[in-house]
Amino acid sequence: MSCELEQKLSRYTPLSNDDRQELRRALGRERTIVARTEIPAESGDPSAVYAILSGWACRSRQIGDNRKQIVSLLLPGDLCDPNAFLLQRADHTISALTPVTVARISGAMLREVTTLNPSLGLAIHREGLATAAVQREWTVSLGCRSGIERLAHLFCELHCRLKAVGLATETTCPFPLTQHDLARMLGQTSVHINRTLQELRGLRLVSLRARQLTIHDLTGLAKMAHFNPVYLRFTAG
């Protein structure tokens, strides 16, 4: 059972013990996905949903042979497209950035538990709305924020999302992403990402070491990024 998933959903609306038990019942067998490989769709049940139990994954789109855009990150506690049953096929790829453990929820099971447990259904619906809000914020970053503001905003968002599920302290969080990953998220080159990281370090706002992000001045970083965590909707917990 993913305690991160339970913890995250309870941030959107309070969950009863029955809700939590039903969520645990809904989670099917676990699978481990190798880093840098795709998480395949469930061929027998295209409406099945995967929950990220551990590791980091991403949604991406590719144009041509080498042009790839990472459009969102999937962290422990995230659901991969809980409304997939409304579509016949996906319009993006989900890939593991690190080794990832996922649990499968069948489409029929998901519809059953959300119908019989309204609070759980509301939490999953709000999770979907928050995911859409994150997507909008990433669009704002690509369209309006400068290079250093984009990276600062991403750092703030990831720290907030990980802290909400108990995977970050007040100042640190895991950060397994490469500069190449960051370039594909932020619409920049790896060289530019490197320069921006050096600038943030020089300002004594952040540091990266041993796959861990340390934020030395969260207030200053948030001010630079124009970061307001309201769009993440972590209000119930």
Image (spheres, grey):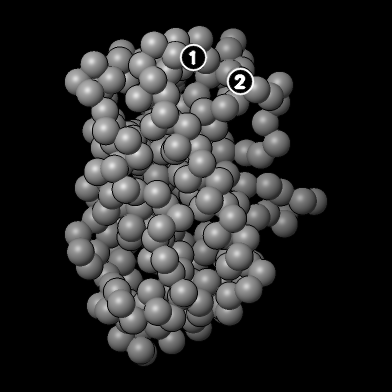
Question: Disc 1 vs disc 2: which is toward the camera?
Answer: 1
Give the percent coordinates (x, y) of residue 52: 39, 34
Q: Secondary structure at mark 2?
A: helix
Whole-number angstrom distance, CA of label 1 to CA of label 2: 9 Å
Q: Check if mark 1's residue and mark 2's residue have beta carbons within 8 Å.
A: yes
How far from the left and from the top, in percent, is residue 188? 62, 71
Image coords of residue 169 (percent x, y): 19, 59
Could you say which is closer to the camera, residue 117 or residue 151?
A: 117
Q: Residues within 10 Å of mark 1 (few under 14, many from 20)?
A: some
Question: Nearer the N terminus, badge 1 or badge 2?
Answer: 2
Q: Is residue 123 left or right of residue 95?
A: left
Camera-side residue: 167 or 224?
A: 224
Is residue 201 visible to us here?
Answer: yes
In the picture as drawn, the residue positioned furthest to the bottom comes out as 202
Q: Quadrant of residue 16?
A: top left
Give the number of callouts: 2
Q: Is residue 106 visible?
A: no
Residue 8, how many percent across, how many down?
A: 32, 39
Closer-to-camera residue (171/114): 114
For this view, does 58 lie left or right of residue 168?
right
Q: Is residue 20 left or right of residue 70?
A: left
Give the residue pinned by disc 1: 111
SS under mark 1: helix
Q: What's the amino acid at mark 1? A: Arg
Outermost residue to the right? 64
The residue wearing badge 2 is 85
- Residue 123: give its label: none
Q: Residue at x 40, y 49 (%)?
A: 233
Residue type at tag 2: Phe
Query: Looking at the rendering, which quadrant does residue 21 occupy?
Result: top left
